[in-house]
Amino acid sequence: MGNVEIFKNLKMKKVTPLTEKTLVIGNGPQARCIAEELLAKDADLIVASEENAFVLPFPEKTEILTGVKIRSCEGSVGNFNLTLDKDGEKVSRIVENVIIAEEAVRKPNFSLYGLTPCANVISLSQLKESLSDDSRPFFKNKKFVFLTGLAKESNAVILEEIMRASLKLQSEFHAKTYILTKNLKVAGHGLELLYRRTKEAGAVYIKFTESQPEIHQQEDDGPVILTFTDDITGEQFRLTPDITVADETISPPENTSDLAAIFGLDTDPHGFLQSDNVHRISVLTNRKGIMVAGPSRDIQSPGEEITDTGNLALSIFKPSDERETASAYKAQINPRLCSGCLTCYSVCPYNAILPDTTASVMPDACEQCGVCAAVCLSRAITIKGLTYIEISDHIEKNTPQKKETFTPFLLAFCCKRSAARAHELASCMGHKLPPGLKIIEVPCAGGVSHYHIFLALRNNADGVLVLTCHEGNCHSERGNLYAHEQLNMIGSFLEIAGFEKERLLIKPLASNMSKEFAEITNTFEKKILDLGPSRFKMKKQDFSFLT
Amino acid sequence: MADKNVLVLGGGIAGLSAARKLADFDIGVQLIEKSAFLGGHGIQFSCKATDKCVKCGACVVEETLENVVRHPKINVLLNTQTQKITRSDGQFSVTLQKNPAYIDPEKCTGCGLCFEKCPAHGAISRGFSKSNLPFYAISEKNCLFMKDKSCSLCQDTCPEEAITLDQKRTDHVCETDAIIVATGFEAFNPESKPYGYNVFDNVITSLELERTLRQESIVSRPSDNKPPEKIAFIQCVGSRDAKLGHLWCSKICCGSSLRMAKLIRSRQPETEMAFFYMDVQTFGKDFQVFYETVQDDIRMIRAIPGDIFRTETDRLRMAFLDNSTHEILEEIFDLVVLSVGITPGKDTKELADQLHLAVSDSGFLSPSENGIFTAGTALGPMSIAETISNAGNAVWETLKYLRI
Ligand SMILES: Cc1cc2nc3c(=O)[nH]c(=O)nc-3n(C[C@H](O)[C@H](O)[C@H](O)COP(=O)(O)OP(=O)(O)OC[C@H]3O[C@@H](n4cnc5c(N)ncnc54)[C@H](O)[C@@H]3O)c2cc1C
Ligand code: SF4
Ligand code: SF4
């Protein structure tokens, strides 16, 4: 029986949300902001934290779980099954959505500046805390030096705090402030204005370009002496502050890497809980139903907790789109063909595979990229739009008539989000494209498998292109990288068999790159013209593995 | 929740994402765009990926635009502006003035014959995305038919009979439950700066460079179409400038220009690149790494140059203070890119009066609530990503106001 029939006969049970509960993980201003907003709309909430007490009071009607550690999370959106540890006991909860909203961790950069903390060497947070309780007479008339972004680049959040502290020290304590930095990070709301106000109030800014100040701390708790050359005048300076304030590195909350593993979330280069991918703006992750907010996802400036909360609320309350939930469009695994190797489980970017003796798909989590189907060696997985029959039909329909002169038949598998759009734009802009070029739109280049490539070659394609999103832009996170692997592998097989591997080409292309689309395809056509018509031959029986 | 209706003013990424999100909640959206094309500034930008995506966000505008034009709940009105807005019983009544499109989007196939044949410079312009429907637009300012009816070549040549030049402006009144103002920004016009913009052909703005890279993929000198050997970027043009009273950092130009400079280096590796700046702002999640590697490709010069002069061989000479020697240096470039900043939109004041909105000291709109909401760079400098989040929050506020 062909896979298509199986696909028709196999009825997937549609998973409807068992609950409308939302779990909020966090114990700080961000989590509370979210809880208040969602509760105002009658959401059903559980708020959980590893800490034993909540820092802030949470509104009533909320189930509060303190001192819990999350152990595992199974299932998909609408039906996440969580196991938590509470006082050595196992607790389980079923929720529709999960929101991770922990608070950031701040690490003072003392060691980066060769300093040891003491009464006159403090961190920015220590200073802020002292300033918030108003009786600190020893700040009076003192000389403060702020060190920021000297050892590594800083950001606008830190600079804003420094400038506010400086302004307060100047206006309330008649203190003298010096701010030493490389790049003044004024890219925040109102910061240029704040910068000018601190300057007018007497703050001195010293900016370094290539050089660095020499920082000396006499003994471990001794006074600090700074010497440096002024960038503009070339003059030598020496500063002896009463108090030296070191800036801080803002890092993800402590338990972030554990949560990433438990929930199967991608992280960014700093370990924040959201991959660095423009398709995750603003609170989304690679998993449907799991959202991240505030300091769990990035360094946040004040006010952003409200913005994140608004965006979260939109995701939580959004009515579901029928097309999105229709399981006929999702990957289908035939249990009779599945060998249980679970390769699909390890590659699925959305954690949509339920591992067991055989694998199955959780339709609500599946985003139809086709990566699983492309890697399944048992060919147990089918997905609408990428089945052998569909692609084969498509190619046959598009195969051009043989012409007198050689016109290369080029088949381009184009990601529907990037290259397929670039192709449309290229046509709109009137760019000349190879006459024998045919496009096959695929949901993700990662769904293109060796079957598809062989199908193309068997149907007399003289060249096959796979056009993907750029690295770091793939909606399926790594689909484009899988496509690279597939193509390289096929290329080397073909080469061993004496076939020109130059007939296969994989390139990244964004949706707005129309000119580049034309350039890539035209250059490829030239190459194929040089190679001449494809001599790829496959006997029917060699091909049986495809049907 | 049925039958609610929201008017979104401005079809840049702020308005597009707001419209899309409202429509997801089954709300009817009237999307009002002043110009002939949706997408605002963002749709004009180039992808700046070299081999990896550099997260500029340009492609997100493309994707959102496509989703919007396909959405059955969103009705787009191009070439349209608000005339009058009145409010009673929680309902807004908005008088809209719509200029004709002249080209019927249903009939136009985007063949481009009109664009090719038109004898008047600038009378027909082209969209940026294939989701710009129609893909061509006729500008009343430059069209000869509008001037004296002396030409109707496009109408006569269009094989689809999609063009009707003899059309009048129309007024529409529309009732709505809430308004989201997403009218965006104006890129700074650097004519007043001593850099010879609009005097020397080879002094261009960063916005023009974005468009060139998008359309041509490589850059050449406007004066002679030759590839430039040396390019200078001048940062903070129109931003962080006390003389202009622009006491804000535009936030996006360091990122946009450095990414473009890197893109040019990767496509035209012979090009020498210099970047004149005051401070480099942190952008993107991977800034530290980006910033370290950018310095291998691009000469970073911490100085803002003085006047620019044209040399006899049609190059550009400028002087700046060198930090290491503390001397004034002169250097010659083939192309100068002015990184222009984000400034308040031209009709901010008028719009604020119409809608009774407050304007901040810097001239941007102040955040507003209670029926009229604000989103995006109309409020001040923001990146595309920030604009999208900001618009999301404005939609949430709108939903709360509408009690949905
Ligand atoms: C040179 C340059 C490069 C940039 N590069 C980047 C980058 O690489 N990455 C990034 O994240 N950001 C970048 N930005 C910033 C980016 O342009 C903005 O974040 C984004 O365009 C903001 O979108 P918006 O919708 O708020 O405004 P806009 O894009 O300005 O859109 C506003 C829309 O509203 C319309 N409009 C105005 N007034 C009215 C009215 N009265 N009635 C109806 N419609 C109206 C306008 O015609 C326009 O279509 C760049 C900006 C510049 C200047
Ligand atoms: S560089 Fe910009 S336009 Fe290109 S893929 Fe990345 S975000 Fe999209
Ligand atoms: S982002 Fe950079 S170039 Fe733009 S105004 Fe700020 S500092 Fe200047």
Image (cartoon, rainbow, N blue to C red):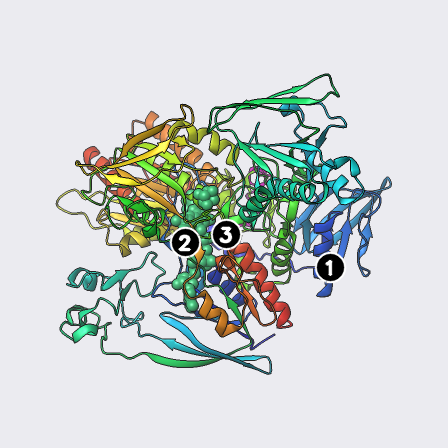
* Label disc, if present, on residue B42 of the rendered structure: 2
* Label disc, if present, on residue A36 of the rendered structure: 1
- Residue depicted at x 79% and y 39%: A136
Image position of A62 (left or right of A262):
right
Visible residue check, residue B56: no
Query: In the rendered structure, which disc, 3 or 2, sits on the residue that comes first in sequence?
Result: 2
Q: Position of residue A77 (x, y in %)?
A: 64, 54
Decide which of A491, B77 is in the foreground and name it: B77
Decide: few, some or many residues near mark 2? Use Cα within 10 Å; few <14, some 14-19, many ≥20: many
Image position of B323 (left or right of B91):
left
Q: Judging from the image, what secondary structure is the residue with disc 1 in?
A: helix
Image quarter for residue A320? bottom right
Q: CA distance from mark 3 to mark 2?
A: 12 Å
| Residue topped by disc 3 | B382
Task: Report if the beta carbon of the residue with label 3 is closer than 8 angstroms to ligand 1.
Answer: yes
Task: Report if the beta carbon of the residue with label 2 is closer than 8 angstroms to ligand 1.
Answer: yes
Asked if residue A332 is among those painted magenta in the image, a careful observer would answer: yes
Asked if residue A376 is among those painted magenta in the image, a careful observer would answer: no
Q: Judging from the image, what secondary structure is the residue with disc 2 in?
A: helix
**Label 3 is placed on what type of residue?**
Met
Image quarter for residue A489? top left
Q: Which residues are magenta?
A: A331-346
